[in-house]
């Protein structure tokens, strides 16, 4: 289920982390897709409690800026 609020994953920082925004709030710095999943579970509605990595990687409702979901430089 897609949330009703925008989800944006920003380009990688020099350390490889990517800022995660849910709605108008920055919810953390992700270093893997699993980090993104956990941030969404915590920030989103109960419907996202069962969210998995594949749900985020293939989701059209997640905006990946500057790099795709498989790009986590370190």
Image (tube, grey):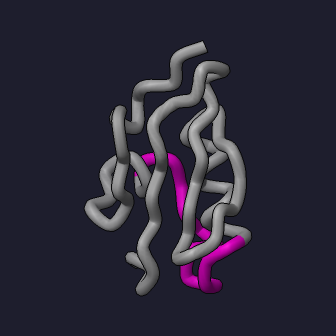
Q: Is residue 52 found inside the magenta-colored segment of the image?
A: yes
In this view, the residue in front, 30 or 42, is: 30
How many numbered marks appear? 0
Q: Residue furthest top?
A: 74
Q: Residue at x 61, y 77 (%)?
A: 44
Question: Percent x, y for residue 46?
Answer: 64, 84
Q: Residue at x 36, y 47 (%)?
A: 64
Which image quadrant is residue 15 in? top right
- In this picture, is 70 found above or below 46? above
Q: Residue furthest left?
A: 60
Which quarter shows the C terminus? top right
Q: Is residue 48 found inside the magenta-colored segment of the image?
A: yes
Which image quadrant is residue 56 in? bottom left
Q: Residue at x 60, y 20 (%)?
A: 14
In this view, the residue in front, 72 or 57, is: 72
Q: In the drawing, does residue 2 fall left or right of residue 51?
A: left
Question: Percent x, y for residue 39?
Answer: 67, 59
For the record, the magenta segment spans 43-54
Q: Residue at x 63, y 71 (%)?
A: 25
Q: In the drawing, does residue 28 fall left or right of residue 50?
A: right
Question: Percent x, y for residue 21?
Answer: 56, 62
- In this picture, is 45 found above or below 73? below
In this view, the residue in front, 58 or 62, is: 62
Which quarter shows the N terminus? bottom left
- In this picture, is 19 found above or below 17? below
């Amino acid at each position: 289920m897609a949330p009703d609020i925008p989800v944006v994953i920003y380009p990688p920082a020099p350390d490889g982390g990517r800022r995660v925004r849910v709605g108008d709030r920055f919810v953390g710095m992700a270093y893997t897709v699993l980090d993104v999943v956990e941030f969404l579970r915590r920030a989103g509605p109960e419907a996202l409690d069962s969210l998995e990595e594949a749900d985020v990687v293939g989701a059209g409702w997640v905006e990946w800026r500057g790099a795709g979901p498989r790009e986590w430089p370190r």
